[in-house]
Amino acid sequence: MNESQKYSAAEVSSMQQNELESRAFIRTASALNMIKEHWEEKKSELPEALDKNRRLWTIIASAMQESDCPQPPEIRQNIINLAMFVFQRTVKVLAEPSPDGLNALININMNIARGLAGKQADENELSSGM
């Protein structure tokens, strides 16, 4: 493992779950947005970017179905429903590729990332006694 990989591994291990998830959503949204903004040059990267986004949502949806998931049932169901929408939109974008078709996926990921980052900030305030 080179020094850069060691640093990345140490950085990831020190992050809390919300921060990791937020970064994953930002990363996938950014990849999709880059394709959208540079459609002609980057549209060949669309299937791979959509696959990464689908895998992220599969992990999140699977976590919501675990018996030890700490989320309330209504939140769990809402996230599963959102994942189903993401999967349907992904199929539609693959069938009919267009830059505008990516808007919903990008917006959903960024809103989820913001929510997770806000939750992280709230937890940090609570743990510091604020």
Image (cartoon, rainbow, N blue to C red):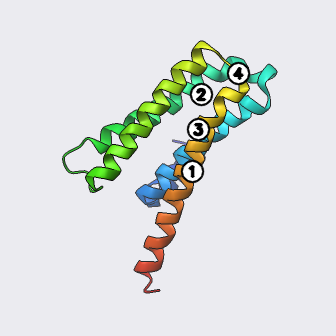
Say the numbered circle drawn on residue 98. Answer: 4
Which amino acid is tagged 2? Ala
What residue lies at 41% left-to-right and 56% top-to-bottom? 17
**How far separated are the C-alphas under marks 1 and 4?**
21 Å
Mark with earlier residue (4, 3): 3
- Is 28 situated above or below 49? below
Which amino acid is tagged 1? Asn
Say the numbered circle drawn on residue 28. Answer: 3
Left/right of residue 63 with respect to residue 110 in the rendered view:
left
Question: Which residue of the protein is positioned furthest toward the bottom in this rendering?
Answer: 129
- Using the rendered view, name the quadrant where residue 36 is placed: top right
Q: Nearer the viewer, mark 3 or mark 1?
A: 1
Q: Nearer the viewer, residue 112 or 46?
A: 112
x then y, percent, for residue 22: 52, 52
**How far separated are the C-alphas under marks 3 and 2?**
7 Å
Residue behind mark 2: 49
Which amino acid is tagged 4? Ser
